[in-house]
Image (spheres, rainbow, N blue to C red):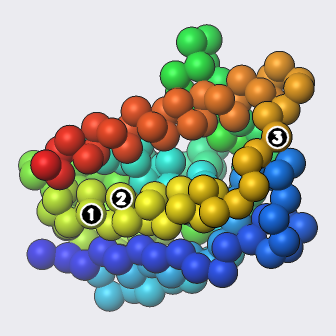
Amino acid sequence: MGNFVIDVDRFRWICGPDDDPEDLCLHGHVTVQIGKTVMEYDGTVSATALYLLKTLTEDKIMSKGDLQMVPCCGHFLIANADLSEVTISGCDNGLDWSVVHQGDGVRLILPSGEETWVSLRDYRQQALRFADKVKCYYDSCLPKKIPEDEFDRNGYIAFWNEWRRRYAAAIRQEG
């Protein structure tokens, strides 16, 4: 059985550590161990948390056209029609790996080709712990100012709608 540990600290908003009610995307320092490989990256951890929650039920394959698991940035939050899911668009920089469901676990595949298999239960626990840390930081800050622009507002609403739905489903699986 492989090893997967992911953690986050040094939270900040794009302009620094001071609380910013207008900044919707949380950044931080991520440390991840997949198998024997340990990687670190400063990225958009709100997107990472959502991507971890998504990969509890969906495969995520590394590709140039998709956001990384730990993206540098998330310039746009693009809502679907009913505001239940969001697509996050950013730059090509970040830390990435593939997550492929296999039996009662996931196969994590690094860009180097190194692979490790992790039970879905262990993977879910790491994803939930990461998401909890990110959400707790949001909750400790001033409430966010919801954007007036419809596109931006819908993206932000869809982000949290998808987060809550996926998080609740993961908690039910833990029970």
Rendered residue at 84%/71% (across/down): 18
Q: Quadrant of residue 65?
A: top right
Looking at the image, which is closer to me, 61 or 128?
128
Q: Which residue is labeled 2 in the image? A: 128
Check disc 1 and report the residue beneath it: 125
What element does badge 1 sit on? helix
164 vs 25, left or right, is: left
Q: Answer with mark 3 or mark 2, whichever residue precedes in sequence.
A: 2
Task: Specify the quadrant of the image occupied by residue 126.
Answer: bottom left
The mark closer to the camera, 3 or 1, is 3
Question: On the rendered image, what quadrant is the N terminus found in?
Answer: bottom left
> Which disc is residue 145 wearing?
3
Disc 1 and disc 2 in contact, CB within 8 angstroms: yes
Residue 31 at what x, y percent from top left? 51, 81
Q: How many marks?
A: 3
Across and down, in percent, residue 103 comes to: 10, 49
